[in-house]
């Protein structure tokens, strides 16, 4: 296949998935799946699951998740303290 045809297929699949309301990350995952199914002999499911698991189980991902959980907890504690003290009302 010509390179322009391949680009057209990938862009069509991407816009199709985005047009149906799929999140951007899942749409890109769908484009990768279509590309692997059409142009490789390796099973796409096994290859993608292995790659996604390896990327998501790194120590960097764990640190980001931990920092996010701490930040959300601090926001929640601060909001509940404002509610108890009566400072959460908006006076006009």
Image (tube, grey):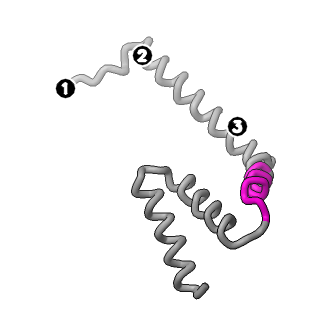
Q: What is the secondary structure assignment of the residue under circle 3?
A: helix
Magenta portion: prevailing SS class: helix
Q: Report the residue at 47% width, 69% height from top.
A: 12
Q: What is the secondary structure assignment of the residue under circle 1?
A: loop
- The residue beneath circle 2 is 83
Q: Is residue 68 above or below residue 85?
A: below
Measure how far apart labels 2 and 1 are at the Cα level. Answer: 18 Å
The residue closer to the viewer here, 55 or 48, is 48
Would you say 63 lies left or right of 3 here? right
Would you say 57 lies left or right of 88 here? right
Mark 2 and 1 residues: CB-CB less than 8 Å, in contact? no
- The residue beneath circle 3 is 66
Q: What is the secondary structure assignment of the residue under circle 2?
A: helix
Would you say 70 lies left or right of 22 here? right
Measure how far apart labels 1 and 3 are at the Cα level. Answer: 38 Å
Mark 2 and 3 residues: CB-CB less than 8 Å, in contact? no
Q: Is residue 11 above or below residue 18?
A: below
The residue closer to the viewer here, 30 or 77, is 30
Q: Quadrant of the C terminus?
A: top left
- The residue beneath circle 1 is 92
Magenta stretch contains residue 31: no
The residue closer to the viewer here, 75 or 20, is 20
Which corner quadrant of the image does residue 44 belong to?
Answer: bottom right
Magenta stretch contains residue 49: yes
Q: Could you tell which of marks 2 and 1 lies nearer the N-terminus?
A: 2
């Amino acid at each position: 296949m010509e390179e322009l045809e391949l680009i057209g297929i990938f862009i069509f699949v991407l816009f199709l998935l985005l047009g149906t309301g799929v999140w951007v990350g899942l749409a890109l995952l769908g484009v990768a799946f279509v590309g692997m199914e059409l142009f490789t002999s390796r099973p796409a499911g096994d290859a993608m699951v292995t790659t996604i698991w390896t990327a998501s189980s790194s120590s960097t991902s764990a640190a980001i998740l931990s920092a996010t959980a701490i930040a959300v907890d601090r926001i929640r504690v601060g909001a509940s303290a404002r509610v108890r003290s009566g400072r959460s009302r908006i006076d006009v």
